Image (cartoon, helix red, strand yellow):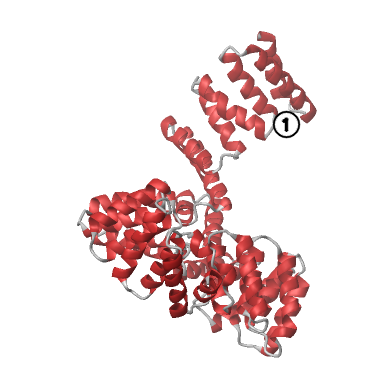
Amino acid sequence: MEELGRLYHANGYTPEAEACWRLLCARRPDEPRWWYYRAVLRLADNDYDAATTLLRETLSRAPDYSPAYLQLANLQLKTGELEGAERDYQRRLALVPRDPYARLGLVRLALLRQRTGEARGLLEELLKDAPNFSTAHSLYAEILAGAGDEKRASWHRWLGVETIRYTEPEDSWLEELEPWCHDYDRLCVLGSVESMREHRDRARALFERAIQVNPAAFDAYQLLSALYFKQEQPAQARDLLEQARPRLAPANPTAWFTYLCRAYRLLGQPAEAERVAREGLALKSDSPELLEALGLALADLGRHTDAVPAYETALGRNPNDASINYNLAVSLLALRRLDDVLAALDRSLTLQPAFPPTLLLRARIEMAAAHWPEAETYLRPLIESHPDDAEARRLFAEWHQHMGAAAEKRGEPAEAERYYQSGLALDPNAAELHVRLGAFYLVHRRFADAIQPLEAHHRLQPESAPGCLFLGQAYAATGRRDEAREVLKQGEELAGRAGNARTARACRELLERL
């Protein structure tokens, strides 16, 4: 009976599943799962009274099962039982500290109680901890709009669309049903949810099962290929797509060609990518996706003059595409057509204001031209919308380094220190920032403060003779004479090998004084 219930539930046969769970509740009432599964089915049918009773039955048998508290709290929020909802959100938080779903529920409670300031504060803290929580961005946008801050509201509305899509919180008892699912569409959805949760092995297994269920449908191949790309496994994506081809024939979807092009490009085979793109265009000549794929392959081959018309033709079919405009800008930049580059990048950002590649390239162009305030206008929103983007953090740290040096020249030491420290918060492995901050402390005779950044620089750049000199100076000034001698000897040797007579002499002179 249990296996039959799982099979019915996992494949969407609700009345049959409910009959099984009801029978199991009567036969084995101490097992909380049966009660929980019944509650979930009643929730899906908007039967709130029955769902509430069943969730409480569940929790009486499993008082530590946090998903049931969240389900019950959300249900009570819908039915206006605000005190009960608050109690159960707090119980969820006691079991899952800093859980974003329970915290979002508390935000909604505060809004229902017309405590807008409290809700705003809770949301700001939540977004610091979970910057990709799209629902929180959308709710924050409403609060900002209500306060008259339409500019920031518009930005957070965009982030609500741009960041990771909302997924239901993890629920181990429902996940136990996944192996019983044999429905193609459900398997694709379940795999997508697991992929967004970064459960990649589980996602791959679900997509593979979907392919077994319906090998002639493309969606699962596409989803599994995307997962391979995310895992930096383009060879597996190529092999999967090539194996799929005879199963999908005679009409291969456009995405089959574009994904295979991407796999070949990532494998460093742009000529193969060009071949596949042209093969697809022979069948679908007006496809902007295939025209873009062709442009990318030609650009990888260094044929930017040929890539530009491919992109322009794609934009003629789909002018509102941020990616095509960005890729056009890259090829135009290679051809040194800067005015056209800027126009293409501006179109890309108009269409998709938080598109990371465009923001990065625009910032690089402004930094190369020493337009530092303009560069910030692209870097700051990029970090806000994609705080984990390593290249964005590295580039913004470089921007902070320049701003710190400029503040030093203006005689603003507090501002310089702030820039250097903020840059290191973005990129803790920025060796140049560490040595800049350390040298700044040496100049201002803050020798003890200089040691940590200079040691970090020495760890990152052990062959740097100036770094050895600065660290030796900090050690000597703080009474760490043995360590100073050791690092200064190393610095003198490194400087001598590099032909840096000035640094070698400075190390030697300090050694003599020690």
Q: Residue at left 71%, top 75%? A: 241
Q: Quadrant of residue 470?
A: top right
Q: Secondary structure at mark 1?
A: loop
* Camera sees residue 398: yes
Quarter that holds the C terminus: top right
Q: Residue furthest front?
A: 27
Q: Is residue 488 left or right of residue 191?
A: right
Q: Which residue is mark 1?
A: 463
Q: Residue furthest left?
A: 114
Residue 294 picture location, percent across and down = 68, 77
Residue 147: image x %, image y %?
24, 58
| Residue 84 located left or right of residue 357 | left
Q: Position of residue 188 (x, y in %)?
A: 57, 74
Mark 1 is surrounded, within 10 Å at the Cα level, by few (under 14), some (14 to 19) or many (20 or more) other residues, namely some
**Which one is nearer the viewer's eye here, 387 or 232?**
232
Residue 427 position (above or below residue 251): above
Of the pair 362 and 454, the residue shown nearer to us: 454
The foreground one among 413 and 99 is: 99
Percent of width and height locating residue 206: 61, 69
Query: Measured along the vertical axis of the image, is residue 488 above or below residue 153?
Result: above
Given the image, on which type of amino acid does mark 1 rest?
Answer: Glu
Whether residue 353 can be seen here: no
Query: How many numbered discs sit on the rendered protein?
Result: 1
Q: Is residue 439 above or below residue 50?
A: above
In this view, the residue farthest toward the right is 497
Q: Quadrant for residue 32, please give it.
A: bottom left
Please identify the residue farthest to the top as the structure is shown: 513
